[in-house]
Image: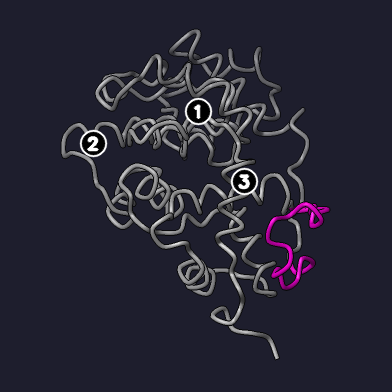
Amino acid sequence: MRPSESEIPIRNDALLEWYGRMGRNLPWRQTEDPWQILVSEVMLQQTQASRVAEAYSRFLDRFPDPASAARADAAEMLIAWSGLGYNNRALRLREAARIIEAAGWPTTAETLRSLPGVGPYTAAAVACFAFGEQVPAVDTNLRRVLSRWVGRPLDGRDLADVAANVLATGAAADWNQAVMDLGATLCRPREPACRSCPVASWCTRPDVYAAPRTQGRFDGSIRQARGAVLRCLISHGHVHRSNLIESVPAVRVEDALKGLIRDGIVVEDADCVTLVD
């Protein structure tokens, strides 16, 4: 019979001790400023921490607070966002900055979800790391780690309940960071380093997690085409569709434009396209 979560000896002391020694030194962990934390968490959506670390300080030098981001035009935001991909995140961040400037900061995981581009994980992370709310920040790493801990694939309400039950109450920020680091460095999707894991003795089933398929190649992809279209628009502003073919393979121009228009990054006027205001 499978043990219930309450019967599994969650050794948060061992986990937190390991994190104190081995936690990654990431720049956004040195602050409790909500804007800096929101920027980092939006950047970390679908982007590796190593790439975010390179862009984080550069972005904050240009936009150190919500007021400066709220005043920016789309080209300025996208230039500062360069290299991170999924560019609609930058424009949603600008929308969030405008709301924060007008109405102030939401301070809980529930209310932070009202900001554009802020989903359940990002809201929980900002609430925990900036405002001290004792909530689990459920990302892909945490889902994988907890699934292995309790011995079954977790998702949805089941995942949320387990995370709330095993959270280190009173130390949520360190616990969240510790689980993220454990998942990123040892409890990896493939070939987890169980022998080095500080809590392996009570991990129920390391093999319960099925790693997702890796992302397709970048060369020739729609992601590459979108990036090329955006670079052209940032450089030249109002561009005729036919001129985009000089920068982007013709077969990809239409697909790239459809996606960018759908995401609210680009607007179309007759046969010309431009960035949103």
Does dot 1 land on a helix, a strand or a loop? helix
Using the image, determine if residue 149 lies above or below residue 13: below
Please tell me which of labels 2 and 1 falls first in the chain.
1
Residue at the farthest top position:
236
Residue at 64% in and 17% down: 245
Q: Which residue is labeled 1 in the image?
A: 27
Q: Is residue 201 magenta?
A: yes
Mark count: 3
Using the image, determine if residue 249 lies above or below residue 149: above
Image quarter in which the N terminus is found:
bottom right
Q: Which mark is residue 71?
A: none
Residue 196 in the image, given as x and y percentages of width and height: 78, 52
Q: Which residue is labeled 3 in the image?
A: 181
Q: State the CA–CA distance, disc 2 to disc 3.
A: 30 Å
Residue 96 in the image, given as x and y percentages of width and height: 31, 37
Residue at 40% in and 43% down: 117
* Amino acid found under the numbered disc labelled 2: Ile
Which of the pair 185/161 is nearer the observer?
185
Q: State the CA–CA distance, disc 2 to disc 1.
A: 23 Å
Q: Which residues are magenta?
A: 189-208
Q: Is residue 177 magenta?
A: no
Q: Quick one: label 2, few (<14), some, or many (20+) residues within 10 Å?
A: some
Q: Quadrant of residue 206?
A: bottom right
Q: Quadrant of residue 202?
A: bottom right
